[in-house]
Each structure stands twice: as structure tokens, then as C-alpha cells.
């Protein structure tokens, strides 16, 4: 990726057509050229203009001179004993003073493959059980950088059609490695709403990456004002990081609760566009020993969710260095799940994946830090002088 050239990845169809004016494409041809590029970027997955064989060579040269479609740098790849993969991607500084890094996780399962995508470098929420929350906020990711995680994953997994596939051939969407996206990586997606929205609408476009909106889930810690917009403007599935059933407990575990307490959060969930038994909200609940795992907590959870089409994901706590919490005993988790199940809610216990490479829920973190302003200014001045 480059800070010197504007990216084409992450632009809407309309913006892509408008960008063609910068490479002297006649106005009448811009929509057609945009469609060609869209196909190459999101169906074929190319990252080099020279591979766009049905585009004239002189136009390819102009595109390469003006725009970028390059991938980010892959700094590290780790593969767990259970097949989970974790990638560390490096993106340009873009105001942070130095290049930034984020983690992205791929979880293979029978019949599906889920990609856990990051939306920010660092996080502002400081949830006390979450490793990401110990990393200070550096910056939002752009729509290009959010989509780049999907494109890189498909590159690494061989999920794009072979380069020799004939022009015009129908490329099936079945049998793909990446079938689901969850916005559950680093950061709070709804604090980066516009970039996340843009990226997810491109990911769900039927003539591109073509992921069903029912296979895209956005997880929020409870940014209440943006929840309705998520359903109305993106239309994806919704997950709520709940983790406690009383405000006094959630204020500690998920401090955003002090701004939007449980009642306001659940009222927003009840008004989520399209909510039905076929489009349930997932409530995520990390199981913390002697904190939120009693039978009384389970009964209160059932009471709170009454009338909301929902399922509850019970997440055994994934430890990380310096954490103050311990995971609930397995028997306690199972008894909690039984109470919720008997009330009519599906409450699967999530199998921890990728713990050995710190790729499990709540364990993602990078070493990126935002440079102080005086250091950024000094670096900029030095670069100008050079």
C-alpha cells in the first residue's frame, strides 16, 4: 500500500467511475471501465494493473501511474494446532506518524470459514477482560484497509479464481474458504461507522466479493446511536458484547455502559431493523469465574432478553498476560447454558480457537502506538529536508 497514490480499493461504484476522469477516460466510458475494474478487484482479486488483460495497455499504464491497488505488507502469519490462522498486517501511517499494524484471524470450521476483521488500530473502550482494550487508540482503518484484510485472506487461502480462468466464465461462489465475516477484531466498528459501512457494502455486493449480508456480523460493545443505522444502512447481522446483566457489573467490564446502560442498549436492540426469528441478534457473554457466571446471572439474562429474538454465545474467557480474570469452571458454564437453553434461547458454548497463537476472542493486539505530535512533526520535517 502507498500513501502517495490514492487507492481504488474501498471506493464505491460511483466513486470508482468518477476516479476514471483522473486518467482521461471519456465520460461515456467511465461506468463501463469502473465495472471492469470492480470485476478485477473483487471477483478476480488482482493486485497489479498489468493483470487486467481486457483493459488497454495504455490505460493500464495510466492507472498504475495514478492509483494503487496494492496489498498491505504481511508482517507475520501464525497457524494454530486447530487450523486457525492469525495474520499481522502493516498499513501506511496515514496521520499516525509511523506505519500501523492490525491482526486478522481466520477460523476454519466444517462447511464454513470465518474471517475476524479489525476496524481500528487499538481501541478506546478499555473493556477490562479484553487484551485489545489495553492498546491505546491509534487511528481508524479506512474502507480500503478493512477490505484489504478480506482480500489478503483470500489471497493466502487460494480463494480467488485461477488466473487462467477464461474471460466471461461464471465463477461459482460455493466452495470458498472465506464464507463469513465478523467485525469482531481490533476496535469498535461503530466508532468507525462510515468506513465500516462502505467496506461491508462492497463485501456484500453481488457482482464482487458477493458475501450474503446474513453471513456478515457486526459486533458492538453498545454504541446505541449507531445500532439502528447499522440495520438500516448496512443490513448485516448484529452481535452485542453484553457480558453482564447488571449495570454495576457492566460498568466495570464494558465501561461504555456508563454512557449507554443496559436498558438503553436492549431498547435499541428491540428496534433493530429486520429483527425476527430468522434474523436474531447474537449476545456475546464471556464467562468470568465468580464475576458473571452464577445461576442468578443466567436467570436475569433470560429476563432481560425477553421478547428479543436472540441467541447467546457463551465464551469461555481466553487468558492473556496481566489479566485479572479467570475462566469459569466448565461445569459452571454448562449449568449456566442449561438455564438459558431451558428458557428457549440457543446458548452454544463457543469452542476456544487459536489460543496457542493468541488468536482467540479478546486476545488480539498489535504493538502499534501513535507518535506524539512533536515527534510526527519532526519526522515530517526530516523527510522534507531529505
Image: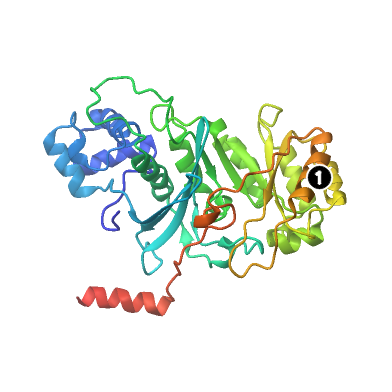
Residue 55 position (above or below residue 294):
above
Residue 195 position (above or below residue 250):
above
Q: Could you tell me residue 338's position as x and y percent?
A: 81, 39
Task: Specify the farthest residue to the top.
Answer: 169
Task: Specify the farthest residue to the left.
Answer: 58
Q: In the rendered view of the protein, which quadrant contains the C terminus?
A: bottom left
Q: Could you tell me residue 130's position as x and y percent?
A: 62, 60
Q: Secondary structure at mark 1?
A: helix
Residue 75 visible at all: yes
Residue 1 position (above or below residue 51):
below
The residue carrying pointer 1 sits among few (fewer than 14), some (14 to 19) or many (20 or more) residues within 10 Å by Cα, namely some
Residue 244 position (above or below residue 48):
below
Q: Relative to 133, is 93 on the left or the right?
A: left
Q: Could you tell me residue 350's position as x and y percent?
A: 65, 44
Could you say which is closer to the camera, residue 138 or residue 111?
111
Q: Relative to 352, is 270 on the left or the right?
A: right
Q: Could you tell me residue 191's position as x and y percent?
A: 56, 54
Residue 24 visible at all: no
Q: Which residue is mark 1?
A: 335
* Residue 253 lies in quadrant: bottom right
Could you say which is closer to the camera, residue 369 or residue 325?
325
Q: Residue at x 39, y 38 (%)?
A: 12
* Residue 209 lies in quadrant: top left
Q: Relative to 306, is 159 on the left or the right?
A: left
Q: Residue at x 27, y 42 (%)?
A: 47
Q: What count of labels does the image hold? A: 1
Amino acid at each position: 500500500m502507498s500513501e502517495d497514490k490514492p487507492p481504488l480499493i474501498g471506493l464505491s461504484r460511483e466513486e470508482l467511475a468518477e476516479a476514471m476522469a483522473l486518467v482521461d477516460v471519456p465520460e461515456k466510458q467511465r461506468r463501463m471501465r469502473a465495472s471492469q475494474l470492480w470485476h478485477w478487484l473483487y471477483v478476480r482479486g488482482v493486485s497489479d494493473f498489468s493483470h487486467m488483460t481486457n483493459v488497454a495497455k495504455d490505460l493500464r499504464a495510466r492507472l498504475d501511474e495514478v492509483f494503487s491497488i496494492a496489498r498491505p505488507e504481511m508482517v507475520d502469519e501464525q497457524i494454530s494446532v486447530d487450523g486457525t490462522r492469525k495474520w499481522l498486517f502493516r498499513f501506511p501511517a496515514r496521520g499516525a506518524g509511523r506505519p500501523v499494524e492490525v491482526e486478522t484471524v481466520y477460523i476454519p470450521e466444517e462447511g464454513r470459514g470465518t474471517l475476524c476483521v479489525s476496524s481500528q488500530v487499538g481501541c478506546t473502550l478499555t473493556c477490562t477482560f479484553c487484551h485489545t482494550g489495553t492498546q491505546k487508540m491509534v487511528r481508524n482503518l479506512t474502507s480500503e484497509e478493512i477490505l484489504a484484510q478480506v482480500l489478503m485472506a483470500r489471497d493466502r487461502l487460494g480463494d480467488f479464481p485461477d488466473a487462467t480462468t477464461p474471460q466471461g466464465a461464471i465463477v461459482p461462489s460455493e466452495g470458498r474458504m472465506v464464507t463469513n465475516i465478523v467485525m469482531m477484531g481490533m476496535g469498535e466498528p461503530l466508532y468507525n461507522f462510515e468506513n465500516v459501512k462502505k467496506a461491508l457494502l462492497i463485501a456484500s455486493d453481488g457482482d464482487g466479493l458477493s458475501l450474503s449480508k446474513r453471513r456478515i456480523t457486526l459486533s458492538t460493545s453498545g454504541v446505541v446511536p449507531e445500532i439502528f443505522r447499522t440495520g438500516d444502512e448496512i443490513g448485516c447481522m448484529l452481535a452485542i458484547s453484553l457480558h453482564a446483566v447488571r449495570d454495576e457489573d457492566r460498568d466495570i467490564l464494558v465501561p461504555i455502559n456508563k454512557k449507554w446502560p443496559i436498558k438503553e442498549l436492549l431498547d435499541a436492540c428491540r428496534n433493530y431493523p429486520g429483527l425476527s426469528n430468522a434474523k436474531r441478534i447474537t449476545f456475546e457473554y464471556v464467562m468470568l469465574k465468580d464475576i458473571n457466571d452464577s445461576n442468578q446471572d443466567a436467570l436475569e439474562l433470560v429476563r432481560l432478553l425477553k421478547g428479543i429474538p436472540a441467541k447467546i454465545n457463551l465464551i469461555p474467557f481466553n487468558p492473556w498476560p496481566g489479566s485479572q480474570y479467570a475462566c469459569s469452571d466448565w461445569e459452571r458454564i454448562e449449568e449456566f447454558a442449561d438455564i438459558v437453553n431451558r428458557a428457549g434461547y440457543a446458548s452454544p458454548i463457543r469452542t476456544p480457537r487459536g489460543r496457542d497463537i493468541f488468536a482467540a476472542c479478546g486476545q488480539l493486539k498489535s504493538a502499534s502506538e501513535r507518535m506524539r505530535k512533536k515527534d510526527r512533526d519532526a519526522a515530517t520535517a526530516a523527510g522534507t529536508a531529505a
